[in-house]
Image: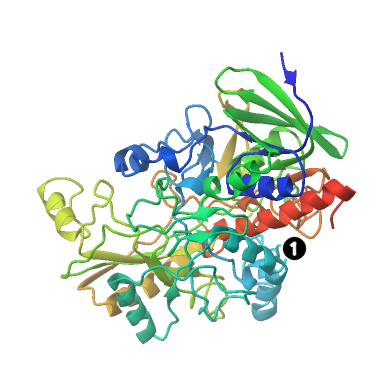
Amino acid sequence: MVKTLPKVDVVTVGVGWTGGIIAAECTKAGLKVVGLERGQERGTEDFSMVHDEYRYAIRYELMQNLSKETITFRNNRKMPALPMRQMGSFLLGEGLGGSGTHWNGQTWRFLPYDFQIKTMTDKKYGPNKLSSDYILQDWGLTYDQLEPYFDKFEKTAGISGENNNPHWGERSSDYPTPPMKKTHILKKFESAASKLGYHPFMMPSANLSEPYTNPDGAQINACQYCGFCERFGCEYGAKTSPEVTVVPTARKTGKFDVRFHANVVEVLKSGNKVTGVRYVDTLTGEEFIQPAEVVVLTSYVFNNTKLLMVSKIGEQYNPDTGKGTLGRNYCYQILPGATGFFDDQYNTFMGAGALGMAIDDFNGDSFDHSNLDFIHGGNISITQTGSRPIATNVALPDTPTWGAEFKKQSIHNFTRTLSVGAQGASISHKENYLSLDGTYKDAYGVPLLQLTYNFTKQDIALHKFISEKSGEIMKEMGAKTVVNRGAIDQYDIVPYQTTHNTGGTVMSLTPEEGVVNNYLQHWDAENLFVVGAGNFAHNGGYNPTGTVGALAYRAAEGVIKYSKTSGSLV
């Protein structure tokens, strides 16, 4: 029997960065908020065993249990889609903080070009720069409109950085804390990039360079450069994450209740409004209905999209007709780059998730694409994240993948190899999309989300171009051997790449172009908000978290406005 609970002002589905921001802002405004988190509670005090590479980085203790819920995948519509049985290309976070607990901390603002990509591309190169198979659209929001929310997120997180990149949009203020330490490795990159005429700068980092107290009074500590960021929680409280910032801010108001092991399986709708959500207690199997004046989907890209589909809210994208927007605009990223083999040894085992230097000279439209068969680009960087012994086994090409020679090269190269790489932008394509699987269901009887995705000609050309540029920088750094990353062809979901999935619930200026408006309010249900990287019309050349954080602050403003006036916010 389903139990109906007392109604609240706002319910969030997921308590990571987006859910935490919504909760903090809404509770400060006096609203009662319930956060439903399907994972467990955790915090800084739970990560005393954080330096266990096998437990966290290999066995993925902080990630989603794929035996209960996963996705199915195929490269194209002619292939059968099969379930992803173990973590591979991307890592799905679970528990308090979500992916904001195990992230590396790179905190970027997408470029002004990203938000008006169609307008700017068409104006400079004409409307036929890409074929009609690509879905190129403006976001419905400009960089300047989003800038105050970028600023607010960075001040909440205490981001460490320097404002000396000529390719960025205008900023209303500097970063709250200075950049991280410029190590010997980073100085080599800086020198090489400068000699080639580029503009290197320290990477904006949520691994803080010094202790910081944010405007809400949350204390974030200084990074210890231990090299255990990605796939780990921070036992020092020095990697800014939801459980040390926005979640405590919401809790101290007395108006925020987090329920753990609460897996939402349906958004309940009546007319042009939603009435609440139905969720399952994953420990007891009990079902509950949580009524709310406003529902905010703040889970990961895949789950936000899936919940709208199973709840029959919005029109699902049909690749045959091109109609519908729900599930459309799915994008991933490419990882071009180059590895250099040196005679000298470097301190590669110390570092931090966002300790790095970068250039944006080949990101966005900061270079001329007139004679190139792709648009956009990628942020090229060198990062000193801390090489760990189990996963770090670098060898020259044609080396056996096991045996004496493999062991010899792995040990020798552990402190003698450096890599320069990029996160290459991904442009939406009509054949890359999300849908519901017709065969497989999760442990709660709900259809799995199906991912149809493959690399495009745009991806392949961009990957080759950026890898060559990365190789030139590595050569200038003095590597005796430079190995550019090989050409890409078919996307493979097995090896880890990035957790930067975007699209599926894209925002837009009109209901015909997207799922939500630029306050992330659903076009078909005025008291439903959908917040996350799913709102991106394409994926840029950066990590998405900073842009997601900014959008979440704008959405929180929208929720508060709606609670006072109701109706459409645009």
Q: Quadrant of the N terminus?
A: top right
Marker count (numbered): 1
- Say which of 65 and 566 sits in front: 566
Residue 253 in sight here: yes
The local crowd at label 1, few if under 14, some if 14 to 19, many if 20 or more residues have their Cα within 10 Å, is: some
User: Going by the picture, which residue comes out furthest to the top?
Assistant: 1
Residue 202 x, y percent position in the rendering: 43, 72
Q: Nearer the viewer, residue 3 or 84?
A: 3
Quadrant of the frame with the C terminus: bottom right
- Residue 521 x/y as whole percent: 77, 50
Point out residue 449 in the picture as x, y percentages from the top left corner: 59, 36
Q: Is residue 52 above or below residue 445?
A: below
The residue lying at 82 percent from left, 44 percent from top is 524
Q: Residue at x 72, y 53 (%)?
A: 555
Quarter of the figure with residue 150: bottom right
Provide the residue designation for mark 1.
Answer: 140
In the rendered view, would you say 344 is above or below 306?
A: below
Quadrant for residue 199, please give it: bottom left
Look at label 1 and name its amino acid.
Gly
Q: Residue at x 22, y 59 (%)?
A: 397
Q: Is residue 191 left or right of residue 260?
A: left
- Give the farthest residue toward the left: 404
Give the camera-side residue of 2 and 175: 175
Can residue 427 be seen by looking at this rendering?
Answer: no
Residue found at x 73% / y 65%: 141
Q: How is the image coloured?
A: rainbow
Q: Secondary structure at mark 1?
A: loop
Measured as percent of width and height from the top left, residue 447 is found at 62, 29
* Quarter of the image where one finds residue 19: top right
